[in-house]
Image (cartoon, rainbow, N blue to C red):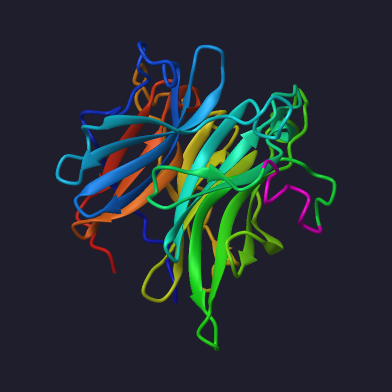
Amino acid sequence: MIVLRKYKWQRDPNNPVLCPNPNSTYDCTCCMNPFVIRIKDEYRLYYAGADREGYHRICLATSLVANPTKFTRYGVILDVGKKGDFDGFWCVLPRVHKFGNKWYLYYTGNDGSNSGLQAFSGIGLAIGDDGIHFERYGSNPIITGDQTKEYPHNRGIAGPGTILEDIQTDGSIFYRMYYTLAVGTLNSDPKIDQKKLCAVCHSIDGIHWSDHRIIMNPREDVSNEDIAVAGPFVWRDTNCYRMFYCGIGSRWGYYSISEAVSQDGYKWYRGEKDENLTLTPGEPGTWESQMVEYPSVIEENGKLRLFYCGNGYGTTGIGTAVTLNRKII
């Protein structure tokens, strides 16, 4: 039997650990969408930074694992595309994964059109040798939002939460990518305007993705996720799959972070009502009083370290928290 683990978190007193820099030309108004990996004794924190004109670019900051609240900005590692391209206005939601000796950087583009979630019209790819310097794999997205049977005319999609590797019977590697399907359309009703679902697709090479499936919908009877579920961050536990994701609900009107558990990575159990709610917005007047969103998790000394962003979808920056007395099983 699989059960929800119900993590308890200690938020870092230094939060937010990566704030917009008012003197910067690339992340002076927003630091959002954290994704962290470890390289030896260093954390690489990939994120999206915004300038004063509203353009968002993929950026990198680093810290020592021994001091994960003090980050040094590296700068922009992927600029926006050409005007009119799917990523001509925003490049956000970075995710990196190593395929052989190459690093793949997946990101979500926004074309700048006034079409709400439908302006996020594709997931793009850039490839590099060192995880820092990347070149675009063409000017078109490699994944679009019209690939599920339920929403064949949808455009909106938001970048991968995680990529997992499965070993096939012949020894080859098969990849799963979890992502957000953004099906909302412009409307005064947030349940229509902001509707998002969690989905998964599959690949053998990291470039061509197929077999798109919806794996999670909003729950109408749960007030913290009755509008949207998004940002699935999935990993394998000893005998199951676990997920952190963020939900938008009428309870707060913005994001909070919840947990789910699965035996196969496709059918997910979320418990009764809001028992799976793991991180709520913070105290009034704090940097995270409005929302907490876009979880990225990494193991650290037998516990979990969470990176996430706060108010205004990252206008107050990125923070971190660690699990309390909870070992990885």
The picture places residue 253, in percent across and down from the top left corner, at 57, 28
Foreground of the two, 146 or 26: 26
**Overall secondary structure of the magenta stretch?**
loop
Residue at point 42% right, 63% down? 101
Question: Is residue 144 one of those drawn in magenta?
Answer: yes
The picture places residue 61, in percent across and down from the top left corner, at 32, 35
* In the displayed structure image, the side of residue 83 where residue 1 appears, left or right: left
- Give the number of marks: 0
Residue projecting furthest to the left = 66
Residue 149 placement: quadrant: bottom right
Asked if residue 49 shows in the view, the reply is yes
Placement of 52 over or under 311, stated as above or below = above
Asked if residue 219 shows in the view, the reply is no
Residue at point 62% right, 66% down? 203
The picture places residue 263, in percent across and down from the top left corner, at 51, 73
The picture places residue 42, in percent across and down from the top left corner, at 23, 47
Residue projecting furthest to the bottom = 170
* In the displayed structure image, the side of residue 18 where residue 198 appears, left or right: right
Foreground of the two, 37 or 161: 37
- Which residues are the magenta region? 139-149
Image quarter in which the C terminus is found? bottom left
Question: Is residue 118 one of those drawn in magenta?
Answer: no
Image quarter in which the N terminus is found? bottom left
Foreground of the two, 267 or 315: 315
Residue 314 placement: quadrant: top left
Foreground of the two, 121 or 301: 121
* In the displayed structure image, the side of residue 123 where residue 269 appears, left or right: left
Residue at point 19% right, 51% down? 41
Placement of 22 over or under 238, stated as above or below = above
